[in-house]
Amino acid sequence: MNIFVTGGAGYIGSATAEALLAAGHNVTVYDSLVTGHRKAVPAGAEFIQADLGDSHSLALALTGQKFDAVMHFAAFIEAGESMKDPGKFLRNNVVNSLSLMDMAVRAGVKRFVFSSTAAVYQSSEEPLSEESPIGPTNTYGYTKLAVEQSLDWYRQIHGLHFAALRYFNACGARMGHGEAHQPESHLIPRVIQVALGQADAAYIYGTDYPTPDGTCIRDYIHILDLVSAHLLALEALGEKDKLIYNLGSGNGFSVREVIEATQAVSGVEIKVIEGPRRPGDSARLVASSGKIRRELGWKPRRDNMRDIIGSAWEWHKTNPKGYA
Ligand SMILES: NC(=O)c1ccc[n+]([C@@H]2O[C@H](COP(=O)([O-])OP(=O)(O)OC[C@H]3O[C@@H](n4cnc5c(N)ncnc54)[C@H](O)[C@@H]3O)[C@@H](O)[C@H]2O)c1
């Protein structure tokens, strides 16, 4: 298939682009590099550096060849920042997604795979299934929900088949590629920065959550497991017109547990600073991913925290400046 990958210079989009190429698909990456890295784009992919907000470039790119599918990774992703500057997130994540959807329909694209998030759910003590109550606690989560719901109207009205993959926390590295957000807000790379001497301390936002050690609990899913689910969803959209799946390992780890695992893997003692809760954070987000396991036969293979940190640690040690 010919696949149009927005955000293919980012962490998850570039890993997926690489796997698509390996599976024999043709890949065009469309990315402004606002937070991505040119070096992360796999060599076999065509690369277009442009912004989704640039409707002329987008139209040219999407009509330049006949695309079978769009995989839409491009977005702003920092939940904390979305609670300070909601307009920035609504414009990029919602408005630009709508332009992309319109353009994709006009160009005759039939399949659309969307990067959604666990942040669409309300916080819950129970593992979150696709039937769990929806209720984003931050603007970022709301933007993803708005796009999911819009996609459903495009499905009904334009016949666009779509998959919304609700990722829990992506983590880990794959051969030669790792997580390098700008700025980095994700826990594992931030703790690794401390282990590498690039940051002074790891911050814990909130130690009074109703969890065993008082810190937030999250589900971490290895990048390679995340990628394999995209390929399965892409195929399944040949028959199904709507897929909504959680993508998580089903294992929850607290902030403290992540810090301890990083200490154990790196052998470096990590200084910790404890502070108040951040707005928009929920106590516990853990996936029940039974639905995609049952329906598409997906199975996460790398759900041990030490292995996850081990792969990330190796990459960051070898690439202390990320892609710079
Ligand atoms: N990383 C996670 O744990 C996680 C969890 C849940 C959901 N997601 C979603 O997965 C997707 C990818 O996340 P990531 O971690 O790879 O982020 P990332 O920041 O590494 O990648 C995003 C990419 O999109 C590009 N981009 C952003 N806005 C753009 C625009 N207007 N035009 C063109 N390109 C643009 C950036 O340059 C970057 O390369 C995002 O949609 C994110 O919301 C990520």
Image: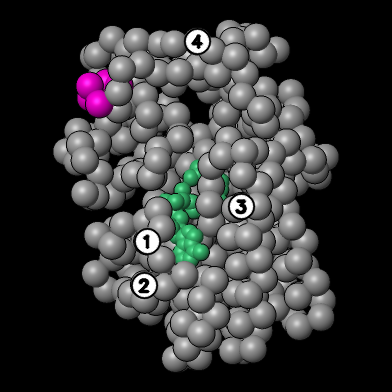
Residue type (three-letter) at the residue carrying disc 1: Leu
Image position of 230 with respect to 153: above or below = above
Does the rendering let one see residue 215?
Answer: no
Residue type (three-letter) at the residue carrying disc 4: Glu
Q: Secondary structure at mark 1?
A: loop
Residue 89 image label:
3
Residue 54 image label:
none
Residue wearing tag 4: 274
Question: On the picture, is 134 further left or further right than 99?
Answer: right
Q: Secondary structure at mark 4?
A: strand
Distance from disc 2 to disc 1, alpha carbons, whole Å, reads: 7 Å
Mark 1 CB in 8 Å range of ligand 1?
yes
Residue 33 image label:
1
> Of marks 4 and 1, which one's residue comes earlier in the chain?
1
Q: Secondary structure at mark 3?
A: helix
- Whether pointer 2 and pointer 1 mark residues with C-beta atoms closer than 8 Å, the reply is yes
